[in-house]
Image: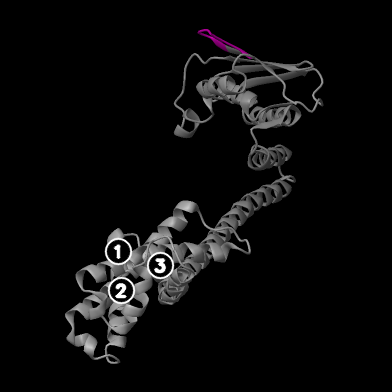
Amino acid sequence: MKSEINKGVYSRLLLPDALRTRASGHMLFWLIFIGYHMIFFFPILPDRVMSADTRLAYLLYYARFIPIYYGAMIVLALTGQPSQKWFSPFVVLFIFILITHLFTKPLYHFYQGLIGLENLPTNFQLIGKYYLRPWIPEKSRDWYVLVYDLMDMQLLALPIGLRWLRLGAMANLRRSEAENRKLEEELKELRAQLTPHFILNVLNAASTEVATFSRKASDYLIHAADMIRFALYDTRSEFIELKRELEFISQYLKLEAMRSSQRSKIVFDCYGDVDTGKRVPTLLITTLVENALKHGVHATHEPSYVKIDCHIEQDKLTFQVFNSKPGIKYPVSEKTRHGGLGLATLKRRLEGYFPENHRLRVSDKPESFLVYLQIPLVL
């Protein structure tokens, strides 16, 4: 709990959500940066304090690092992060030197025009004469100005170093959060796996216990466990082997037959080679069976009838489901009323999988309901 609180504090410090907070942090840093350098050098040269022009010159000198820093960051952002090549540090260094020069040269021209270099301390006069020369160097010594640009960059070590530390801390924080999310997902997955296993083990143990008293009840529990196992592990992909889906339908019908054998007759006939390795959309034909049982068997206490015919050809499946309709419908539970995917969903799936290569016919009569479906088999 304490580590989570600490991570929350670090996250707010390193990745503040509010733009105002980020801007305030940057402003505070640059105020401290400029104030520190001004105060650090003033005791050494007391005459700086006495001259307003000198104070302005030093203030602008240190303040120019603000546009230099952000200008370099913008250029790096626009050009992309440098690759991990041996010359990458030199490219970054060249960009910083160039931007430093572009901001420093106009500054010394400003000094010369407003104050006059002769009215500033000696160090400004010695360096300024190089910056006041033409933009394109005419003499070899004119290139010395780039050495001064490089020397000035030592003052950028602090903001750049802090930025790298922040980026490193942010990367570690994101990595830690990603690892925590991964652990949470693994824990959820483990719990999701343990819960079904527990249910299946309980059903299998219960079937063993009741076998001595009722073989029918034991078989019912075994079939229920097989169906749960199928629903949990075999329906994760979009397509499933036809053989496996038909086995599930067979178990489903056996379970329903055991449940309503006194008042319902359920017939399932399958013709053709099941072991073809061909596939069908998962639970597509099971939807037809489920609807027939829901509307033909579960909706009444009267005698009912369901007839299912399955014809398998080389590359085609024909599936027909016929069920009787009750004369008197009894109230059904909300779970039963809204259970199943329904014909509307089945039609949408057919249009998605086989838009021009399927046949679906529905015959709805007062006493019966018939659905005829023909789809291609998929390798």
Identify the residue shown where x is 73% and y is 32%. 244
Q: Secondary structure at mark 3?
A: helix
Circle nearer the N terminus (2, 3): 3
Task: Please name the predominant secondary structure of the magenta segment in the image.
Answer: strand
Find disc 2 in the rendering and name its residue.
Answer: 61
Circle nearer the N terminus (2, 1): 1
Kindly report the distance in space between the C-alpha atoms of the residues bearing marks 1 and 3. 13 Å
Kindly report the distance in space between the C-alpha atoms of the residues bearing marks 2 and 3. 29 Å
Left or right of 198: which side holds 130? left
* 362 falls in the magenta region: yes
Instruction: Spot the residue most to the front.
Output: 139
Category of crowding for the residue at label 1, using alpha-carbon neighbours closer than 10 angstroms: few (below 14), some (14–19), many (at least 20): few
Q: Nearer the viewer, mark 1 or mark 3?
A: 1
Q: Is residue 133 above or below residue 329?
A: below
Q: Secondary structure at mark 2?
A: helix
Q: Is residue 237 above or below residue 189?
A: above
Closer to the camera in the image, 127 or 60: 127
Image marks 2 and 3: residues in contact by CB distance under 8 Å: no
Circle nearer the N terminus (1, 3): 3
In the rendered structure, find residue 14 and report the number of the disc placed on it. 3
The residue type indicated by label 2 comes to Tyr
The residue type indicated by label 1 comes to Ala
Left or right of 178: which side holds 63? left
In the rendered structure, find residue 23 and report the number of the disc placed on it. 1
**Residue 295 visible, this orientation:** no
The residue type indicated by label 3 comes to Leu
Boundaries of the magenta span: 358-369
Residue 362 lies in quadrant = top right
